[in-house]
């Protein structure tokens, strides 16, 4: 389930070390964090802002902010990926505030409509049904699912990003998944 | 069964995951490799400001305005904090107050200076004096100095040169030599009040200052009162002259002339009194004593004294700085906390 989480293993330790070592080490650690998180951050941000252009701008801005703040990362306050996604979350929510739009966590309509060349009609139907069910969830619930399945964060990291306890994050994620399963019942 | 359903749901969700365009990913990689080069600050600021709705500019603009207001109030408070009335400035605090209230209309406007105390800036002095342009202040100073015995004559000569340069008057001077006591040169001086500060500073540089006392007294009330009495007396004389012209009998004329003599004596007294007061305001009275003592050069005690003086001045500066900076820092902290709380709520609203 946490296939992308596996990619980031070791990044935290590298960034922790980097905070105390030479600037070059900090740059290398950040580069590793960037490589392991670039697509995950984009996926999460795109889910929040639901606009490819805006998602690109926000993703770039989030990485730029993180880069500027890399020396201020405090490992005692959480994981590096959680820290990065916290920055991305703030950047995305700021973008939403600016545009006065509500958060939409579903993927872009262009990605949801129409069947892929290599998929069957049943698979396309299932994908559309899950996307529609996802769109009907509360924004906060959809964000949790995006963090879990689009960004590949663990419960503890999600808790750090959203600013709740780990158990609370787990409970809320469980409820969101239950609602999603119920909404897709019969198609899975 | 449930497990396979969950697996299918998870797999479908991962299929729905948005992926970045390759062009965007490549461009971001390039920027990351370059260390996310900054755009020009001006361009970034302009772009950022354009993106912020006017409504959201209100808080920072309000905070900046409040900060400006606080700075203005603080500057006003520090600039005018020493103002105030004081009728008699015998103490050093009173001297400061009176000094700030002196008459700038007088050609010889007095001002305060005491060895070891800083002089107020000219702008501050002018501003304060202008606000109290009708004040009359009488000033006197006593200064005891010590110089090496072999320098006493030179120091006395330099003191006289200072008086001359200040257009002052030497009322009395003496040089006392006594085998049992140190030699001493005394000077009783009148210095134009406008030059008094400079003169006092120059006297202080002649030797080590043993003691310094600077007194001021506000003589505005007696000056104004005397001038008013003078005007009234003159008016009475005018009236009596009219009566005299209209007098028809010798007895009547004698009575009026007697009254006229009395009033003229009164006018003379008042004019003399007014002249004294004006002289007191225009000329500061200085008493300078220069002792021929060998202080033995700069000693450990002097060093400790100097160190104490430097520390006390540094402490005073620090206290004034804190008095301005602490409220500003508190306001900035409050603004920061308020902004954070507001931002947190705004972001939560954006999501929900």
Image (cartoon, rainbow, N blue to C red):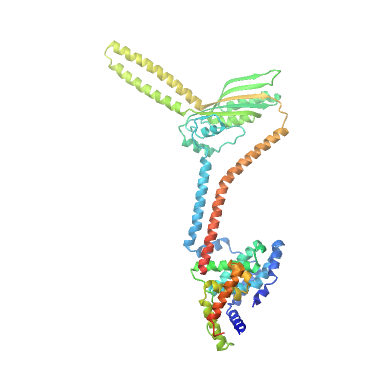
Residue at the image position 30 percent from the left and 18 percent from the top: B243
Residue at the image position 70 percent from the left and 35 percent from the top: B303
- Residue B347 in sight in this render: yes
- What is the x, y in percent for residue B153? 67, 23
Residue A179 vs residue B223: left or right? right
- What is the x, y in percent for residue B342? 52, 61
Q: Nearer the viewer, residue B82 or A5?
A: A5
Q: Residue furthest left?
A: B248
Q: Residue furthest top?
A: B250
Quarter the N terminus of chain B occupies: bottom right
Q: Nearer the viewer, residue A111 or B270?
A: A111
The answer to whether B137 is drawn above or below residue A53 in the figure is above
The answer to whether B146 is drawn above or below residue A3 in the figure is above
Q: Nearer the viewer, residue A120 or B173?
A: A120
- Residue A85 in sight in this render: no
The answer to whether A49 is drawn above or below residue B179 in the figure is below
The answer to whether B323 is drawn above or below residue B283 in the figure is below
- What is the x, y in percent for residue B332? 55, 53
- What is the x, y in percent for residue B274? 45, 23
How many circles with numbers are drawn on the protein?
A: 0
Residue at the image position 65 percent from the left and 40 percent from the top: B311
Q: Nearer the viewer, residue A129 or B96?
A: A129
Residue A174 vs residue A6: left or right? left
């Amino acid at each position: 389930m946490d296939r992308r989480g596996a990619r980031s293993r070791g990044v935290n330790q590298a960034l922790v070390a980097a905070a105390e070592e030479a600037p070059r080490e900090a740059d290398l650690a950040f580069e590793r964090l960037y490589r392991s998180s670039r697509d995950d951050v984009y996926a999460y941000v795109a889910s929040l802002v639901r606009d490819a252009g805006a998602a690109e701008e926000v993703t770039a801005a989030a990485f730029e902010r993180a880069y500027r703040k890399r020396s201020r990362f405090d490992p005692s306050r959480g994981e590096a990926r959680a820290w990065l996604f916290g920055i991305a979350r703030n950047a995305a929510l700021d973008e939403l505030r600016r545009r006065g739009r509500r958060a939409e966590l579903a993927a872009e309509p262009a990605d949801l409509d129409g069947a892929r060349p290599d998929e069957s009609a049943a698979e396309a139907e299932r994908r559309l049904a899950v996307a529609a069910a996802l769109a009907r969830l509360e924004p906060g619930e959809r964000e949790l699912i995006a963090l879990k399945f689009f960004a590949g964060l663990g419960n503890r990291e999600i808790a750090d990003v959203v600013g709740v306890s780990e158990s609370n994050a787990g409970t809320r994620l469980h409820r969101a998944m239950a609602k999603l399963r119920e909404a897709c019942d019969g198609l899975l | 069964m449930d497990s396979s359903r969950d697996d299918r749901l998870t797999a479908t969700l991962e299929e729905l995951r948005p992926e970045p365009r390759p062009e965007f990913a490549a461009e971001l990689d390039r920027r990351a490799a370059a260390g996310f080069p900054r755009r020009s600050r001006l361009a970034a600021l302009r772009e950022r400001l354009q993106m912020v709705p006017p409504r959201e500019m209100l808080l920072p603009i309000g905070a900046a305005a409040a900060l400006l207001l606080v700075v203005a109030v603080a500057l006003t408070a520090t600039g005018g904090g020493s103002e105030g009335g004081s009728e008699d400035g015998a103490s050093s605090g009173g001297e400061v107050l009176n000094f700030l209230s002196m008459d700038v209309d007088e050609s010889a406007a007095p001002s305060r200076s005491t060895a070891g105390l800083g002089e107020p800036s000219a702008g501050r002095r002018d501003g304060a004096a202008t606000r109290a342009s009708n004040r009359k202040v009488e000033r006197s100073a006593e200064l005891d100095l010590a110089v090496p015995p072999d320098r006493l004559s030179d120091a006395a000569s330099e003191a006289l040169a200072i008086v001359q340069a200040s257009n002052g008057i030497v009322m009395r001077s003496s040089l006392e030599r006594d085998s049992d006591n140190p030699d001493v040169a005394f000077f009783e001086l009148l210095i134009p009040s406008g030059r008094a500060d400079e003169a006092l500073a120059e006297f202080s540089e002649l030797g080590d200052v043993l003691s310094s006392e600077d007194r001021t007294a506000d003589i505005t009330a007696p000056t104004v009162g005397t001038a008013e009495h003078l005007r009234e007396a003159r008016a009475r004389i005018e009236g009596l002259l009219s009566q005299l012209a209209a007098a028809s009998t010798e007895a009547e004329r004698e009575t009026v002339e007697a009254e006229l003599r009395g009033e003229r004596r009164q006018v003379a007294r008042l004019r003399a009194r007014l002249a004294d007061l004006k002289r007191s305001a225009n000329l500061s009275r200085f008493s300078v004593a220069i002792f021929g003592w060998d202080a033995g050069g700069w000693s450990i005690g002097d060093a400790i004294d100097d160190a104490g003086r430097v520390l006390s001045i540094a402490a005073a500066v620090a206290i004034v700085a804190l008095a301005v900076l602490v409220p500003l820092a508190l306001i900035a902290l409050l603004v920061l906390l308020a902004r954070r709380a507001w931002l947190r709520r705004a972001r939560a609203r954006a999501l929900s």
